[in-house]
Amino acid sequence: MSAGEVNGSDDDLVFKALASPTRRRILDLLRAGSRTTGEVAAHVPELDRTTVLQHLRVLERAELVTGRKVGRERHLSLAPLPIKRIHDRWIGEYARAAVELLEDLDRH
C-alpha cells in the first residue's frame, strides 16, 4: 500500500467521523478544552452513555480525539492534525482555485 492510499484511508475515517452532527458537537466541545468522558456525555443528554462512547470510538479511530487515563477518569482532548490535513489537501486547494477564478474575472 502506498503512502497516498494510507492517507486516503485516513481521510475516509476523518470524513466519516465529521459526517455526524453529534460527533461535530463533541469536537466543538473538546476544542474549548480537555473534558472527561462523563463531561462529554453530560453535554449530549439526549444520548445514553454507551452511544456517546461509540461516537468517541469513531473520533479516536479517525485520530481526531485522544484519551488518557487519570486515576479512574478518562480525559479526552481534540487532536486537530487530521482536520488540518483535510484542510490542506481539500479546502485550501479549492479556496485557492476560487480566489484565482475571482481574480481572473476581475481582470476581465
Image (cartoon, rainbow, N blue to C red):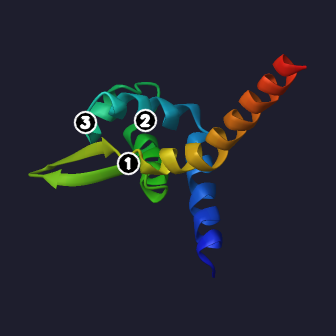
Q: Position of residue 39 (x, y in %)?
A: 27, 32
Which label belongs to residue 35?
Answer: 3
x 62%, y 50%: residue: 89
In the rendered view of the protein, which quadrant contains the N terminus?
bottom right
Residue ID for mark 1: 65
The label number, if any, that marks residue 107 in the structure image: none
Counting other residues with Cα less than 10 Å from the Cα at mark 1, is it few (<14), some (14-19), or many (20 or more)?
Answer: many
- The residue lying toward the viewer, choosing from 60 and 11, is 11
What residue is shown at x 42% (from left), y 54% (from top)? 60
**Residue 83, position in %: x, y?**
50, 44
Q: Which quadrant holds residue 38?
A: top left
Name the amino acid type tagged 1: Val
Assess whether mark 2 and mark 1 are in contact (beta carbons under 8 angstroms).
yes
Instruction: Tell whether 96 sits left or right of 39.
Output: right
The residue located at (12%, 50%) in the rendering is 72
**Mark 3 or mark 2, which has the lower sequence index?**
2
Kindly identify which residue carries mark 2: 27
Q: In this view, does 44 lie above or below 56?
A: above
Q: In this view, does 73 lie to the left or right of 103?
A: left
Asked if labels 3 and 1 touch by Cβ distance under 8 angstroms, the answer is no
Residue extending farthest to the front is: 107
Q: Earlier in the sequence, mark 1 or mark 2?
A: 2
Q: What SS does tag 3 mark?
A: strand
